[in-house]
Image (cartoon, rainbow, N blue to C red):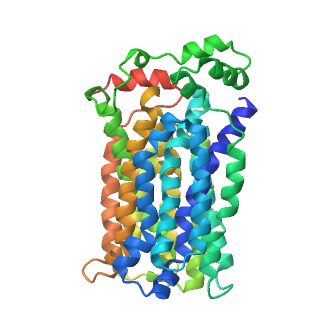
Amino acid sequence: MNKKIILWSITAALAGFLFGFDVVVISGADKKLQALWESSDAFHGWVVMGMALWGTVIGAIFGGIPTNKFGRKNTLIVIGILFAISALGSGLASGPWVFAIFRFIGGIGVGASTIAAPAYISEIAPAKNRGRLVAMYQFNIVFGILIAFLSNYLLSGIGENDWRWMVGVEAIPAVLYILFALRVPKSPRWLYAKHKIEEAKKVLAVINPDIPVEEQLKAFHSDSDETDTTETIFMKKYRFPLTLAFLIAFFNQFSGINAFLYYAPRIFEEAGLGESTALLSSVGIGVTNLVFTLLGVFLIDKLGRKTLMYIGSVGYIISLSLVSTAFFLGWSGMAVPIFLFLFIAAHAVGQGAVIWVFISEIFPNHLRASGQSFGSSTHWILAALIPSLIPFLFNHPMIGAGVVFLCFAIMMVLQLLFVAFMMPETKGKTLEELEKIILTKK
């Protein structure tokens, strides 16, 4: 595989690092901000903690527009700028509403990155390595999560306003990412779709110099090239890929993954661990996530997307059932962290490795950004709703953590059925071949 393809894929995937860091860094400041601003559980959950997630919803809903109109590369650069502004503004915030606004800006970057980065990588990657290359986006997400957990642990206690350093330090990798993104070429498939043929040829000549450019361009041709340019993903013929994108995103969030990542220290404290131990356990979660994501990246083009989803679904059901049981029976010590490590491992190998790869593969070239926008929007609307409810649900006398994790376990049984009866395998096929296969299914 061309080394430049690897380099450009890693660069685009670094948007995932900022995604992971941004989403999780708030967990270290969670309880400190609630105490500082004396916020109610509802205000803290929906505004202070949840505003970034509502930003991701906007970024996911509308991110397909610039990704399609201005290109994957230009959108990635703007995403880096949004992260930098968010980090600096959040770190300097004078009150909860200012803090929430700047977190919202970062959230827009997160939502848009889930469209632009996987689309870019899938469109420059060879079919046999596409899963692994797109999954590097997920690897960078979990690497960002690990660094955020570690950063929070190291910065905790450095002063009364340690939370400002926790959220503000993200500006450093954001600026570095912008500089890297400026150096990647535009997607040749996007250039082809926009009829910028000569520019597409130049990129293709670099990507694969051993194959004639005209032959590579011919491979980009699909039946959709002759379709009406006013087509949308909501047309009847695209119902199946639309349903696939919705369900994989739906089940991703109903595993409880974002609720857990946002509130990991709080969950560990609920289980009886002290604040310092809870933060350190969160670092352990980050390490587990990283290791098993690497395993998922290694296996995704060998075993396939569907097999990894089977493994992850079974792991989800076992681990979430154990976490729920631990809260119901009052098990203390390291029981809950160990079960949650198993949960993270199951997520990393399954949904974590597969979701962004799968959504980037199932739509035709001319609708890829729109299709990813739909899948990403579903993901982030639920990612905003579910974590925002966690403080209320955990503290409600009739609900509590045990019931919440039991509900997540039940949802993963339904995911297992989705994988068994609906999800197609996409490994090893070109994007144009997948278009023909998926659009024949009803």
Q: How many marks?
A: 0
Nearest to the observer: residue 213 or residue 47: 47
User: Is 186 located above or below residue 114 in the figure?
Assistant: above
Give coordinates of residue 80: x percent, y percent.
61, 52
Give coordinates of residue 331: x percent, y percent.
42, 81
Q: Which quarter of the rendering shows the N terminus? A: top right
**Residue at image coords 36%, 56%:** 381
Nearest to the observer: residue 160 or residue 20: 160
Nearest to the observer: residue 82 or residue 353: 82
**Residue at image coords 54%, 36%:** 70
Q: Looking at the rendering, which quadrant does residue 435 occupy?
A: top left
User: Is 377 located above or below residue 157 in the figure?
Assistant: above
Give coordinates of residue 87: x percent, y percent.
60, 66
With 156 as the anchor, is 322 left or right in this view?
left
Whether residue 262 can be seen here: yes
User: Is 58 located above or below residue 150 in the figure?
Assistant: above
**Residue at image coords 54%, 66%:** 24
**Residue at image coords 56%, 30%:** 123
Whether residue 295 can be seen here: no
User: Is 221 located above or below residue 423 in the figure?
Assistant: above
Q: Which quarter of the rendering shows the C terminus? A: top left
Give coordinates of residue 389: x percent, y percent.
34, 71
Nearest to the observer: residue 354 or residue 53: 53
